[in-house]
Image: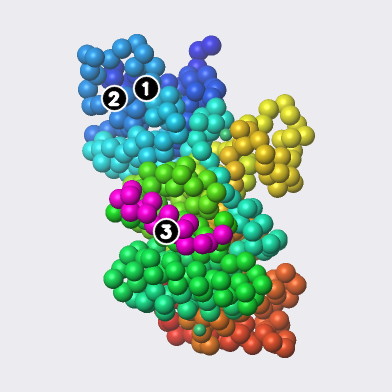
């Protein structure tokens, strides 16, 4: 069957040199045949290159090629070429199919990134190159760990349903002694909060030695659990300079007497790396692996023409087996981000079937003709239960973790934009800047959640008896005043 190309495409094809032609195939029968991972980039060609020439150079450098055809190519190596299979000249978009046999076997995420946003980001042949979305065939999904301990397990441990996990980050970000740090944890927990995380730079600073921080947090947690009768969780940052120190921190926590479920391991997934993230997932499948994404802005900010989206980062974190990753507040908080940028990733790491920016991704191996199962997956009416115990057929959920600049007055606005309560929220300033302190900040957060579940506005609810912490939070955070910290971000 002869494909009719537009004049423009025909001219672009005629402009390709023999090497570039080897990385282009607009007649690829079915890119979703299971042999390829698919990616879509926004791309602006570099000087002297047209769209298709530059796209073919990207496909070459992100798979088997370099800037010249080499004499050492073989028939098989050519089978591993990535292929440009579609372009949208108006929108400056390029679709590339990557034979996923290129990737390190055994589920290695850093290896994928080294190809698809590795050297290509530094090439002269492009002026802009941003990976917008990825699509994984189910045969490939099965090679990757996916999450083990999930948000469902965490909610079971906390004995909570139809509400987010209410958390905080201890502030000031750094500078408290281990005892002072634990005191703030205690205040948040007795105020009614569920979950406390180290801030992303917390490590073994001389004024807050790691071992003492762990022990003081254990004491604070025991006290708070006893006084409230509720389970509590602490997410410890185990990022470190080297593997041994990271494992030493994990083992210190596990040997400090925390019961399973009461602690999570936080990893600065970008600065500590994918190997650290995957090591934790594989070594501690019974622990919630909390991926903090500090430094992601270098790649993901909408105004960055070179890099990748939050969606790409979030989907790879799920593939790697992070139990949760920060996905942004969709502009409700202090960080840049829109519903498009932040909510689509949150849905893509939560659901078994979700629309991305460019692809609909199924995270389950559901037979196409299995209409009723597909209906369950599509409407997610099964709430993942269909795949709970047959993980071979699907990649478990990864929890959106929502922080940056949220406070109790912004909880409902965020839930409204998110469209569900299947997430963890960790408010730092939103709790510890409360005029009556951390305990009141936690109480205000709990009251804001109560108001939401009772379908009453926080203004109304805060007038009721015993809800003064919420009233004070609204007063302090809710009304736009002169340029406060929050607005100056
Ligand atoms: C939030 C936070 C988080 C950022 C990360 C901070 O503190 O602890 O690390 O939210 O951003 O250090 O800023 P606040 P994101 O709650 O006081 O803002 O969640 O978008 O990755
Ligand atoms: Mg699988
Ligand atoms: Mg106190
Ligand atoms: Mg932080």
Q: Label for residue 252?
A: 3
Q: Is residue 314 above or below residue 456?
A: above
Q: Quadrant of the C terminus?
A: bottom left
Give the structural element (helix, strand or loop) at label 1: loop
Residue 107 shown in magenta = no
What x and y, as percent, mark residue 44? Answer: 34, 41
- Which residues, given as a range, are shown in magenta? 242-259
Q: Nearer the viewer, residue 220 or 33?
A: 220
Q: Nearer the viewer, residue 256 or 404?
A: 256
Residue underneath mark 1: 81
Rounded to the nearest whole Å, what is the CA distance between mark 2 and mark 1?
8 Å
Residue 445 shows up from this direction: no
Give yes or no for contact between labels 2 and 1 (Cβ–Cβ under 8 Å).
Answer: yes
Residue 439 shows up from this direction: yes
Residue underneath mark 2: 65
Residue at x 50% of width, y 31% of height: 143
Rounded to the nearest whole Å, what is the CA distance between mark 2 and mark 3?
46 Å
Residue at x 69% of width, y 62% of height: 159
Q: Nearer the viewer, residue 268 or 50?
A: 268
Task: Check disc 1: other Cα within 10 Å, few if <14, some if 14-19, many if 20+.
Answer: many
What x and y, as percent, mark residue 165? Answer: 60, 63
- The tag earlier along the polypeptide, 2 or 3, is 2
Horizontal arrangement in the rendering, residue 70 relative to residue 274 (left or right): left
């Amino acid at each position: 069957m002869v494909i009719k190309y537009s004049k423009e495409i025909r001219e672009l094809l005629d402009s390709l040199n023999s090497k570039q032609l080897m990385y282009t195939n607009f007649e690829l029968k079915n890119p979703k045949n299971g042999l390829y991972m698919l990616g879509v980039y926004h791309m602006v060609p570099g000087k002297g290159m047209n769209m298709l020439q530059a796209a073919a150079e990207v496909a070459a450098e992100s798979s088997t090629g370099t800037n010249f055809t080499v004499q050492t190519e073989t028939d098989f190596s050519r089978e591993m070429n990535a292929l440009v299979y579609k372009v949208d000249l108006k929108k400056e978009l390029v679709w590339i199919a990557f034979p996923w046999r290129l990737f390190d076997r055994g589920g290695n995420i850093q290896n994928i990134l080294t190809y698809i946003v590795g050297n290509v980001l530094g090439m002269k042949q492009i002026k802009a190159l941003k990976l917008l979305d990825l699509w994984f065939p189910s045969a490939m999904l099965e090679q990757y760990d996916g999450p083990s301990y999930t948000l469902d397990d965490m909610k079971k441990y906390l004995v909570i349903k139809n509400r987010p996990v209410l958390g905080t980050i201890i502030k000031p970000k750094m500078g408290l002694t281990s005892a002072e740090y634990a005191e703030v944890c205690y205040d948040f927990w007795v105020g009614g909060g569920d979950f406390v995380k180290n801030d992303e730079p917390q490590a073994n600073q001389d004024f807050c030695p790691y071992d003492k921080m762990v022990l003081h947090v254990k004491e604070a947690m025991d006290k708070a659990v006893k006084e409230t009768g509720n389970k509590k969780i602490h997410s410890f940052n185990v990022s470190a300079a080297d593997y041994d120190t990271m494992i030493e921190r994990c083992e210190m926590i596990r040997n400090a007497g925390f019961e399973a479920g009461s602690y999570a391991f936080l990893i600065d997934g970008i600065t500590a790396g994918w190997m650290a993230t995957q090591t934790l997932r594989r070594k501690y499948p019974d622990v919630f692996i909390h991926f903090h994404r500090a430094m992601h802005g270098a790649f993901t900010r909408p105004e960055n023409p070179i890099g990748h989206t939050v969606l790409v980062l979030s989907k790879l974190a799920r593939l790697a087996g992070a139990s949760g990753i920060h996905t942004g507040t969709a502009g409700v908080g202090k960080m840049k981000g829109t519903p498009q940028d932040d909510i689509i990733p949150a849905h893509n790491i939560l659901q078994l079937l979700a629309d991305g920016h460019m692809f609909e991704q199924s995270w389950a191996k559901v037979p196409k003709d299995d209409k009723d199962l597909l209906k369950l997956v599509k409407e997610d009416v099964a709430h993942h239960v269909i795949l709970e115990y047959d993980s071979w057929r699907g990649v478990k959920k990864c929890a959106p973790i929502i922080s940056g600049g949220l406070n109790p007055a912004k909880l409902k606005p965020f839930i409204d934009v998110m469209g569900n309560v299947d997430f963890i929220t960790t408010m730092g300033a939103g709790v510890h800047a409360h005029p009556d302190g951390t305990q009141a900040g936690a109480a205000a957060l709990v009251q804001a959640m109560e108001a939401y579940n009772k379908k009453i506005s926080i203004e109304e609810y805060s007038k009721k008896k015993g809800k003064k912490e919420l009233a004070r939070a609204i007063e302090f955070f809710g009304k736009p005043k002169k340029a406060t910290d929050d607005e100056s971000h």
